[in-house]
Image (cartoon, coloured by chain):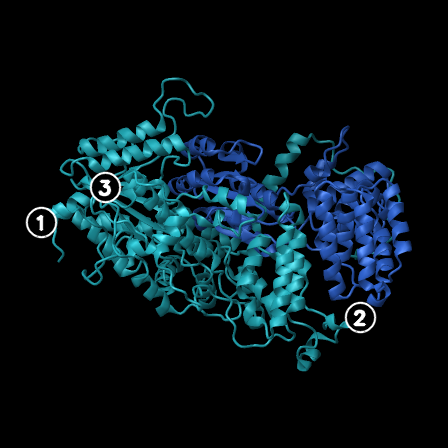
């Protein structure tokens, strides 16, 4: 903290010291700017050529290298096939044409950057379908924000009209049409990506009504609808500062349950296809072909920009969570300057690491696992006598009084203060990660007890009204307490640090809660006795498993309601989430695992029964009187 | 890093003085302190254009907003006025604004050289509601041909996933003491400030890596006292002098409760509030090398508790004295307390 300068007193105030003339602030403000741009241009002249090249095509990579054909898609083949099948069925007139009636709404869900939109666009092109896309328009008349004059069409009624018109009068050209095919085809598909503000209850209700009407429109004059909803979970689920705020934040997130009206959710008219994060093999293939394409086009003009090294690309891929868009954004930004390929070898690795660190991509990123490793590996001076030569002698530490000697530890190499400054996420999320992983690093129950105790203590600091003001205590107590309680040296048994299961648990909870609610609604429509949520959750599971469905008569007859998320919960002591890598193990995500997950994981929304009847899973059910045979 | 030649031109003696934070705000990326790797890239982007969507995250006062402004100025030059839409937490940024204002801006035609785009600057983006962020994501995509977004925030996990996915995320790390010191010394030289080393050390201590606060405190001390010394800085910042706090902690470690309480009362009588005192105790303890690891941990635990009680409204000297007593007891032999 001591300043480097040792002049204890500066020179006495000079009598006059005029910096510049008395130019007005206005002119001098612009001056430095122009100077800058000139001087920079001269500085690194060789980069000037880049400007001329990129000027030709200044789109983002994400736009520029958008996939055009099915082969270019980085999405799992089965997933593409599923979507393609739905689309074909929706337009088919042949013997399977009976399905057509039910292929009204398709929702594509999944994390962002999993290729949902890209898949639809590519398939639409391949199948010669014209995409009609809804875009929330701004007010046509005023364009401004503040001038709200009486008789303008509200956004939602515009949306309503849009759907009606798109359904009824196919030939018209709409104001918000964007035709992707150059030659207009008679097969049309409505694409909804930019949803009206469904967080607003009135708007949501109107939106739901619009969808319900749409579903019932006759297929002969109408066309199918695709809604794309990306998971936006993290904001609501970032570790939960406390129970209350967590609840309120969850409602911020938009998910399928909110987009679709309640009784459409399980109806046969709606199919849901969930996309998984892109498996790393697919990701790598796509990125490499893109990079070679990109740099081939650059190299033809001059040979100065080199593609980034394999290691660099790999580490970006690993930390991406299967989000291809994020990978491309990071790479585009990173390759703006030559990556340190030419430098000396030892330095290179260090520099690459530094660059990566400064560009932490996502929350569950290298940086986070790096910090986690620092805490959990608990490195101290004197861990290994051989190291002493490199790191110098153990710094002398002040002594504890005698009665506390059992708490003595060799001086730590980790400084919680620095960790706090470096942490890319808030304290509660970091605590969640430590909590998920600490047991692997403990030898005795006492170690675990110690860590637990400190974690609990740390949690208490976030329990007041202003967690922001005490979050540094929480972080310090969490990290320093963990470090102090872990054994030293920590045993190395190739521990893998993983993402907290908490997220998965919350996801499952939400699904289960939704199903309980569905069944509750159904029961209350039946007007039997009121059954409380907890009764449904704890006692009705067996009945539902036997296949009992509340009989509503009429159209709802045999429509199935999902209940698997809460009616059948096998005890599994070894459940671990295995899809996040750690900092210590460089390549923990095994590819097979990921692809397998991709192929088999997603359970259909409304088709839990009839095991093995279908060659591929059938997306949704149908009504009994439709006389559709299983094939 | 900081070359102050440009800033110098602004220093023409003025009747009223600008806050130095504004006066010495870097105007070009070359002047932005710290985070060299990231800023090097921003510089190339500033020159070549085609700026991707970016999110800059990091602690307050480390140059997030400044770098975005510098970038926008370098990219757009004279067109800055038409080409930039800036919204911060004090502007209304609900769904309506995102839908209308930002979208209208994105649709606006502005003639820019090739490779240049309009820029939407969203400062403190983590304070935007989830709904507003949702409404924004399509706009980011549809108009990316003509408009790029630059977001600044403290922690990126308050930004919803779909937006993170569309941006290159840059994380600024905390400025080192040396980087802040260098800038302070420069300003002192230009402004002809009289200072001593303790004064600068005190500025760095009180600012905790926040450049803005360091410069503000420098200016307040200079205009208030005419000399930047340690004591003056702590007076201006209205914080107890860390040396006094250190003395308290040392007494606690020695188990000398009378001496510790006496010093505490002294501070209290000088008029420092309980929050001031407890905050400074925390700052001192966490970087106090005379404490063993375990002692430090237990001390911080106790300080945290007291801090919470004070935040809940009991800012009395009794709470502080209780804290001191607990800290003292910690290092005393347990036998002493047996009946």
Q: Is residue A195 left or right of residue A607?
A: right
Which numbered tag is attached to residue A94? 1
Residue at x-position 56% and y-position 50%: A42
Q: Are marks 2 and 1 on the same chain?
A: yes
Of the chain colours in the picture, the one used for chain B is blue
Real-space Cα distance between discs 2 and 3?
Answer: 73 Å
* Residue at image mark 2: A403
Residue A457's x, y, as percent? 65, 57
Mark 3 falls on what kind of element? loop
The cyan one among the chains is A
Asked if marks 2 and 3 touch (Cβ < 8 Å), the reply is no
Against A348, is B215 above or below?
above
Closer to the camera in the image, B246 or A36: B246
One can see residue A410 in this view: yes
Residue at x-position 80% and y-position 70%: A403
Which numbered tag is attached to residue A552? 3
């Amino acid at each position: 903290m001591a300043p480097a300068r040792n002049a204890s007193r500066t020179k006495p105030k000079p009598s006059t010291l005029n910096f510049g003339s008395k130019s007005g602030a206005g002119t001098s403000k612009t001056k430095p700017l122009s100077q800058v741009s000139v001087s920079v241009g001269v500085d690194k002249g060789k980069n000037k050529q880049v400007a001329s090249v990129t000027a030709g095509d200044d789109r983002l990579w994400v736009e520029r290298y958008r996939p055009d054909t099915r082969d270019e898609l980085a999405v799992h083949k089965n997933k593409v096939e599923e979507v393609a099948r739905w689309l074909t069925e929706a337009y088919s007139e042949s013997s399977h044409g009976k399905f057509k009636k039910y292929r009204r709404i398709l929702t594509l869900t999944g994390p962002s950057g999993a290729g949902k939109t890209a898949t639809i666009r590519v398939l639409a092109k391949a199948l010669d379908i014209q995409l009609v896309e809804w875009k929330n328009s701004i007010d046509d008349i005023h364009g401004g924000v503040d001038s709200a004059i009486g008789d303008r069409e509200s956004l939602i009624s515009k949306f309503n009209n849009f759907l009606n018109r798109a359904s009824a009068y196919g030939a018209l050209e709409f104001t918000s049409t964007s035709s992707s095919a150059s030659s207009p085809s008679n097969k049309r598909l409505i694409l909804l990506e930019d949803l009206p503000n469904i967080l607003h209850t009135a708007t949501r209700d109107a939106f739901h009504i619009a969808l319900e009407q749409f579903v019932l429109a006759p297929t002969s004059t109408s066309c199918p609808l695709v809604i794309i909803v990306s998971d936006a979970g993290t904001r609501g689920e970032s570790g939960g500062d406390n129970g209350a705020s967590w609840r309120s934040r969850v409602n911020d997130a938009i998910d399928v349950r909110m987009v679709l009206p309640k009784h459409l959710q399980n109806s046969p008219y709606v199919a849901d296809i969930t996309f998984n994060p892109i498996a790393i093999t697919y990701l790598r293939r796509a990125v490499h072909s893109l990079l070679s394409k990109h740099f081939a086009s650059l190299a033809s003009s001059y040979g100065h920009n080199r593609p980034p090294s394999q290691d660099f690309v790999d580490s970006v891929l690993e930390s991406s969570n299967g989000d291809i868009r994020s990978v491309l954004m990071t790479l585009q930004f990173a390759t703006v300057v030559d990556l340190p390929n030419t430098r000396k070898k030892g330095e290179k690795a260090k520099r690459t690491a530094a660059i990566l660190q400064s560009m932490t991509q996502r929350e569950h990123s290298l940086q986070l696992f790096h910090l986690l490793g620092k805490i959990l590996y608990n490195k101290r001076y004197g861990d290994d006598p051989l190291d002493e030569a490199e790191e110098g002698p153990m710094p002398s530490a002040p002594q504890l009084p005698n009665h506390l000697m059992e708490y003595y530890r060799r001086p730590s190499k980790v400084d919680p203060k620095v960790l706090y400054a470096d942490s890319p996420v808030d304290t509660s999320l970091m605590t969640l990660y430590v909590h998920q992983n600490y047991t692997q690093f403990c030898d005795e129950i006492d170690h675990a007890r110690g860590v637990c105790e400190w974690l609990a203590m740390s949690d208490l600091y976030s329990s007041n009204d202003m967690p922001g003001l005490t979050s540094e205590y929480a972080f310090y107590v969490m990290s320093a307490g963990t470090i102090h309680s872990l054994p030293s040296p920590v045993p190395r048994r190739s521990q893998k640090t993983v993402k907290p299961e908490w997220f998965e648990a919350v996801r499952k909870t939400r699904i289960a809660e939704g199903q309980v609610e569905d069944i509750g609604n159904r029961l209350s429509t039946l007007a039997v006795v009121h059954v409380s949520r907890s009764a449904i959750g704890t006692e009705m599971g067996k009945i539902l498993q036997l296949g009992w469905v509340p009989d509503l008569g009429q159209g709802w007859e045999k429509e199935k309601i999902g209940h698997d998320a809460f009616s059948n919960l096998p005890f599994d002591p070894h459940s671990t989430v295995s899809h996040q890598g750690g900092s210590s193990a460089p390549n923990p995500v095994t590819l097979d695992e990921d692809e397998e997950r991709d192929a088999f994981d997603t359970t259909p929304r409304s088709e839990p029964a009839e095991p093995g009847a279908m060659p591929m899973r059938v997306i949704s059910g149908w009504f009994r009187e439709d006389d559709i045979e299983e094939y | 890093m900081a070359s102050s030649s440009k800033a110098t031109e602004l220093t023409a003696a003025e009747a009223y003085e600008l806050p130095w934070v504004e006066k010495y705000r870097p105007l070009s990326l070359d002047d932005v302190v710290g985070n060299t790797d990231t800023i090097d890239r921003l510089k190339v982007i500033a020159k070549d254009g085609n700026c991707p969507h970016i999110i800059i995250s990091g602690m307050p006062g480390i140059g997030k907003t400044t770098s975005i402004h510098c970038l926008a100025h370098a990219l757009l030059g004279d067109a800055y006025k038409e080409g930039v839409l800036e919204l911060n937490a004090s502007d209304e940024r609900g769904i309506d604004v995102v839908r209308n204002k930002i979208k209208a801006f994105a649709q606006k035609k502005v003639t820019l050289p090739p490779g240049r785009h309009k820029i939407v600057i969203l400062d403190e983006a983590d304070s935007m509601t989830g709904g507003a962020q949702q409404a924004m994501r399509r706009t980011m995509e549809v108009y990316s041909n003509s408009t790029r977004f630059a977001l600044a925030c403290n922690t990126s996990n308050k930004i919803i996933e779909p937006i993170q996915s569309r941006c290159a995320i840059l994380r600024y790390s905390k400025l080192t003491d040396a980087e802040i010191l260098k800038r302070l010394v420069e300003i002192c030289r230009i402004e002809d400030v009289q200072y001593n080393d303790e004064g600068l050390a005190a500025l760095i201590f009180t600012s905790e890596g926040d450049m803005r606060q360091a410069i503000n405190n420098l200016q307040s001390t200079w205009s208030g006292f005419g000399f930047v010394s340690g004591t003056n800085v702590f007076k201006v910042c209205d914080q107890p002098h860390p040396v006094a706090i250190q003395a308290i902690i040392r007494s606690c470690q020695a188990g000398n409760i009378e001496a510790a309480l006496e010093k505490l009362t002294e501070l209290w009588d000088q008029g420092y509030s309980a929050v001031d005192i407890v905050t400074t105790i925390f700052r001192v303890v966490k970087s106090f090398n005379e404490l063993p690891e375990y002692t430090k941990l237990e001390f911080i635990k106790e300080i945290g508790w007291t801090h919470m009680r004070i935040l809940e409204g009991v800012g009395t000297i009794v709470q502080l004295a209780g804290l001191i007593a607990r800290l003292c007891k910690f290092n005393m032999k347990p036998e002493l307390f047996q009946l």
